[in-house]
Image (cartoon, rainbow, N blue to C red):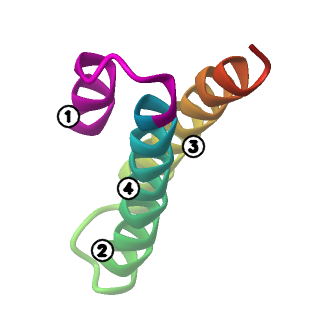
Amino acid sequence: MNNIAEGFERRSPAEFAHLLNIAKGSCGEIRSMLYLAEDLNYLTLETVQHRRESALQLSKGIESLAKSLRDK
């Protein structure tokens, strides 16, 4: 979320789009770490699946926002 806020405050569509890409990458990192947490039995499968789905939905939302900027 911080990358999105930073990009918005810069008032440049190109910088906003760049920071959206970084935020989307961070969602991928979170999903990767959730696989690790599952493998190490730090979280239950149910918790991991729920959080992975949430991160995926967030990533899709970020992509939609980035696409709307590219289409302008």
Looking at marks 3 and 2 on the same chain, the residue that comes earlier in the sequence is marked by 2
SS at mark 4?
helix
Question: How far apart in space, not on screen, are marks 4 and 1 (Cα)?
Answer: 11 Å
Mark nearer the viewer, 4 or 3: 4
Kind of residue sitting beneath label 2: Ala
Q: Which residue is mark 3?
A: 56
Circle number at residue 2: 1
Q: Which residue is mark 2?
A: 37
Question: How far apart in space, not on screen, are marks 4 and 3 (Cα)?
Answer: 11 Å
SS at mark 1?
helix
Neighbour tally class for label 2: few under 14, some 14-19, many 20 plus, Cα within 10 Å: some
Residue 57, how many percent across, how many down?
A: 58, 32
Q: Which residue is mark 4?
A: 26
**Are dots 2 and 1 in contact, CB under 8 Å?**
no
x 47%, y 44%: residue? 18
Mark nearer the viewer, 2 or 4: 4
Q: Quadrant of the C terminus?
A: top right
Write down the region rendered in magenta: 1-14
SS at mark 3?
helix
Question: Which image quadrant for residue 34?
Answer: bottom left
